[in-house]
Each structure stands twice: as C-alpha cells, then as structure tokens.
Image (cartoon, rainbow, N blue to C red):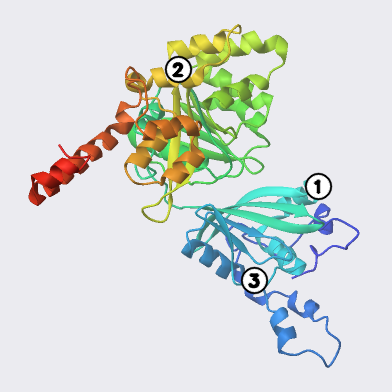
Amino acid sequence: MSETITGSPSSSVLSAAGNDHEARVPQPVVTAAAPTTSAPAAPQTATTPAGTAGTAGAAAAAPFNFKAILQEMVRQNASDLHLKVGRPPTLRVQGELTPLAHAAMRPEDLKFLAEQVMSPRQVKEFAEHKEADFAIGVPGIGRFRVNVYQQRGTIAYALRSIPYQTSTIEELNLPKVIEAISLRPRGLVLVTGITGSGKSTALAAMIQYINEQRHANVITIEDPIEFLHRDINCHINQREVGTDTGSFAQALRRVLRQDPDVILLGEIRDLDTLDTALKAADTGHLVFSTLHTTDATQTINRVLSFYPPHQQAEVRFSLSTALAAVVSLRLVPRKDKPGRVPACEVLINTAAVRDNIRDMTKSLNIPELIKEGTLQYGMQSFDQSLMQWYTKGVISYENAIFYATNPSEFALRVQGVAGSSDTSWDAFQADTNAQRRLRGQRVARRLARRGPRAAAAHPSGP
C-alpha cells in the first residue's frame, strides 16, 4: 500500500488527504479489519541499531490486529472502544473504561488503520476539519459508529458498537407509554440524555415499533447511519449526511417534498435544523430527534435558548403546539445481574404543559406537571422510574440515590415519609407495599410457629 497517509511531522496527520487520495480501499466501510494482519508499517518500526534487534524488538513491531480487538469488544459486550497513541485499546463495559491486555498503540498503527477504514472523501474531511464521523461494518463481527479525531498531533478513535438487530421497546425495559408516543400521528418527539445514555437505541426501537404497527413513509437523516432498518410495513429511506445529502439543513429543506409521514433527525445541532423540525411537526408530520440534555425541563430551556430574545414569544407558541413528548434517559447499573437499565423521564405535552410553555411571565414548572400527569397520561419523573426499579430489587439504593434528581426526597420516599394526599407515586411503590405485606405475613407465620411469647416480643408481629 502506498505511503499516502503517513504525512510529515510538520504537516497534518493525514497530509496527503487534500490531494486525490488513492489508498487501496475498495470497500472502506466493510473490509475494515481484514488487511491489518499484514501491515506494511511493521518494517518501519525497527528503530533499534543494527545487530541489537531481539525478541523484545520483534514483539514491539508486531502488527496491530484491528479485527481481533473488535471481536474482543463484541465478546465483552462493550459499548465503546477507544484507541489513542501511548495507551492500550480501551473498552467501555457497563459504563466503566477497561484497558485490554494489549501493547500501547503506536502512531503508525492508527495511521495504517485510517487507510483501511476511511474512504478518500472521509480522509479529505479529516485533513480539513481534524475529525470525521462515519460507520463501518465488519462481516461476521458487527457494525460500528466511528469518530476519528486528532489529539496532540496524532490520530485517535472512538467506536460505538451498533447491534445488527434492533431491540424492541419491551426488550429495552422502556415504559409502555413509549409505544403510544411512537404511534402519535404528528408532533415533535425529543429523546434526550448525556452521551451513551441510549438515545439512538431508544429511537431505533421506536422506529421499529412504527415499522411493525403502521403503513407509513419513514425518512431518516443521520450522520452517520447507525441502525439499519428493514421494511416490514413501512417504506423506510435512510439518508446519510455527506453520502446521500450535503447537510442536515439541505436534507430538511427538501424532505417535505418526499411525502414523509415520519421524519427522524439524528440530532438537532443548530437553529436551522430546529426551526425546520418544528415547522415539519407543526404541519402534520411525526418528527423524532435527539438533544444532549439531562431532563425535560432542561430540554425545553435548550430549545428556547436557540432563539434570540425578540423571538421568544413566537417560538414558545410554536413549541407549545408542535411538541408531542420529551423522553429523557439515564442508564443505571443493575445489582441483580450484569448490565444496566434505563431510568426514564417522560413528559407528554398536555394542555397544562402547553400553557406553561407559552406563558412568559411564569417559570417552567415541568416537574410538578409531570407529577400531576402521572396517572392520567402515563408521565413519570426520573425519581419515580428509579423507585420502580429499586422496589423491584433491580438496582441498589446507592445507585438510585446517585442517579436521582432529588436524592433527599427520594430517600424520604424510601423510608415511607410522604404526604397522604400525593398519589402520583402509588403505581411506582405498589411493589414495595406488596413486598412489605408478604414480609409481614412470613414473619407472622414464623412467629406463630415459635409460640405466643415470641410473637408478643417481636415488634413486627401482628
């Protein structure tokens, strides 16, 4: 393979990328890993003086086996893989970073990997912007979303594993109300959370549910395409920014001419994208997208912050009519077995929510509106979701407190300290009450077998 990506220290890491790059990458997103076992960079790493090369030098020059690293990533069910110079490949397993028993990465390893996984267009993009996003598929292993970026003058990679098979809403342990949200005829649905909280996975499950339940034309605009959807009942078209369209804004300007029923935007990144999404939702389309916000209140504030002060009244009215729901996610480690479960906050745009968004004289009171809509509309707060998982014995008390929005209030709820008129938590604490009754019955039977004296002495006796 020609040395067109090695570059010189004084130039860009991929200095040749600005020219007509002709790296031998006939299938750049599919044959990513196969050639790495015969990397030509190995002879260049023999930097020891003549006559001193030994076993240690040969081991240091061993080629980087990218395919084996990906296989280990899948075997450990890791969500992410990080590659950077001077560190061994590092996996994120159940939210924790774990380095592999592998030699530290070398600059030539990562430069050679770029030749294998990046197309000429992506190499040019990286040379211009010092970062690039794309997806690769490795036969027999899986699909991965890749972000290549530059740090300290060297290449680094962040890879996210993408399952071939889309999980269902039920398999992801999302609340039942998500199914009803997915089948809404129109409106803007925002799925929010920090990086790695399961936003893309939840969106894919919702599109899959629509695919099974409706006969609709679904158009997705993503950067890059992550989950691949097969037509079941819906007509699904997936467009990738940079490959199938120039930009989010360009695709959105024309999407309404493509007869869509459902539109999915990978992420709302700027005012133009948000403005078009609101207009599409307001004209009778169901629009899904994501934001990097932590809860429903912050999501609405973030949307409003995109607009200048003189447009606040207008955008508040537009958002109040276009918004259908906000679904916010946090992944919490399980205590009963390895894995994580989603704590999920759900806001449905009811009449009370609409009035609160429109009224500029009052601050947003979303938590209270969620509490009021729990029984009638299926809304729930993060703390209610955590309470449900805790009472089922799925998560620990420590993790529930750590991920709670109001830890002190949550602790009081666990201790049974709450107002008697507040019924919004009843559905989430029903399991707790049932468990208490069962424990009381077991204690009563055990004490009855011991005799009346033991029962009288036990504080939990009947």
The percent coordinates of residue 329 (x first, y second) are 49, 37
Please identify the quarter of the rendering in which residue 338 is found. Answer: bottom left
The quadrant the N terminus occupies is bottom right
Compared across the picture, whether 229 is left or right of 448 comes to: right
Question: Label 3: how many residues lie within 10 Å, few (<14), some (14-19) or many (20+)?
Answer: some
Q: Is residue 338 above or below residue 306?
A: below
Q: Which residue is label 3 attached to?
A: 36
Which three-letter amino acid code belongs to the residue tagged 2? Leu
> Mark 1 vs mark 2: which is more N-terminal?
1
Extreme residue in the bottom direction: 51
CA–CA distance in space, label 2 to label 3: 56 Å
Q: Is 246 above or below relative to 377?
A: below
Q: Quadrant of the C terminus?
A: top left
Residue 61 relative to residue 262: left or right: right
As rendered, which of 78 and 248 lies closer to the eye?
78
User: Real-space Cα distance between discs 1 and 3?
Assistant: 26 Å
Which residue corresponds to the image point at 81% horizontal and 47% vertical from the top-left? Answer: 128
Q: Can you tell which of label 2 and label 3 is closer to the viewer?
A: 2
Q: Amino acid at mark 3?
A: Thr
Picture coordinates of residue 293, whole percent (x, y): 58, 32
Circle 1: residue type = Glu
Element marked by disc 3: helix
The residue tagged 1 is 128
Answer whether labels 1 and 3 touch (C-beta < 8 Å): no
Pick the front one: 116 or 194? 194
